[in-house]
Amino acid sequence: MSSAAKIGQPGDGNGAYDIPLSEIDVAQPELFRTNTMWPYFERLRREDPVHYCAASTFGPYWSVTKYKDIMQVDTSHQIYSSEASLGGISIRDQKPDFLMPMFIAMDPPKHDAQRKVVNPIVAPDNLEKLEGTIRERAGRILDSLPIGETFDWVDKVSIELTTQMLATLFDFPWDDRRKLTRWSDVATAVPGGGIVESEEARRAELLECADYFVKLWNERVNAPPGNDLISMLAHGDATRNMDKMEYLGNLILLIVGGNDTTRNSISGGVLALNENPDEYDKLRANPSLIPSMVPEIIRWQTPLAHMRRSALCDAELGGKHIRKGDRVVMWYVSGNRDPDAIENPDSFIIDRARPRQHLSFGFGIHRCVGNRLAEMQLRIVWEEILKRFSFVEVVGEPVRVLSSFVKGYSELPVKLHAPN
């Protein structure tokens, strides 16, 4: 297995130290598909923590790569905006002719009002109710897997579990639940990268998603308020008058947030334990480490590599002058490997003293609304895995997603070993 974090040195031929600093463009999706971005981020953290890239596929942008600087941007929404009309939350601009406003891509007060509508779905009492459902489904999925045969963990476990969960949260037609997976993939895909061939094809599929969900909205809005996400949006004071594109935007946010992130952490955890067999031994010997392992997996994987903001005014960050309108990209994937903030950050350690000290969920007003649900799903999955298998063995190289936004896997070949 290749190491998850190859650290480059000057002249080692990997490119990170062999080009002028000004030419570094960490937003290239290919770096993430090949898992070769690490030395570039390491160099930026060392030499230019707030780095300007003048030319990229996405246009000029600032890279913020140190933990403390990312925190400063993430908690300063009055300076750094998430607004969809200014470009939104990913390095790729939302296009003016296909704007999908969503509450994560809004500033207060509208952001706060819309976020409040969906908060009850992840309230502690509701999570308590969901725990039994998640455990039963995880058990059923794991019991259906073949022992001793190679299969794709991403498809059979990671996608299936998270898509079932998402279908429950939306009260979505069960037999159509894999549509949610597809729409999640399409929403974040690079056109021409293997999922959709063009921007036009991407838009067409997203409009199909909107039409499907409009039918569900119409059913729920004419029924008494329920405790699923669509009913909450249809009956919420701040969301009941959304137009189709704003509804679609919030759906995509909830689908990607509830699906992509958890599924890639489920896959990433299996890979991390295989790459760090001593930690897997530690886990098998002491399953009570699962609650501290879960946030370490989420840090290690960092399922969303970045979030983007747009400067509302001139500002100074890390000694650099940010101009009004500039695109500012917070590289969570880099901040989570910053040795000035996290001890021994390039090591996967399941019993860290402060495992929740990571950036994967963001900070400030946009901190992930479903973070506790994500942690709960991961915890339950690993509790159920350890009951059934002595080893989930990765038997081939993972296939990574071509994206500098979603840091994930499309395939992970594994073989299960029966209990000893």
Image (cartoon, grey):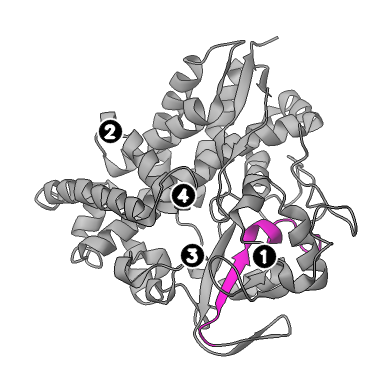
Q: Nearer the viewer, residue 276 or 375?
A: 276
Which residue is at the front of the view, 19 or 159?
A: 19
Q: In the rendered structure, which disc, 1 or 4, sits on the residue that comes first in sequence?
A: 1
Which residue in the structure is indicated by mark 2?
176
CA separation in Å, label 4 and label 3: 15 Å
Tell me which residue sits at (48%, 45%) in the image: 260
Q: Between tags 3 and 2, which lies in front?
A: 3
Q: Residues within 10 Å of mark 1 (few under 14, many from 20)?
A: many
Q: Disc 4 marks which amino acid?
A: Gly
Label 4: element kind: loop
- The residue carrying mark 4 is 192
The local secondary structure at tag 3 comes to loop
Q: Gap between marks 1 and 3, in whole Å?
A: 14 Å
Q: CA distance from mark 1 to mark 4?
A: 20 Å
Q: Is residue 65 above or below residue 142?
A: below
Q: Nearer the viewer, mark 1 or mark 2?
A: 1
Query: How many C-alpha atoms fall within 10 Å of the one at disc 3: few (<14), some, or many (≥20)?
Result: some
Write the residue at 44% across / 72% down. Answer: 87
Disc on res. 92: 3
Q: Which residue is nearer to you in this view: 139 or 20?
A: 20
Q: Is residue 18 magenta?
A: no
Q: Which residues are magenta?
A: 324-341
- Mark 1 sits on what residue? 25
Which mark is nearer the camera, 1 or 4? Answer: 4
In the image, residue 70 above or below residue 282: below
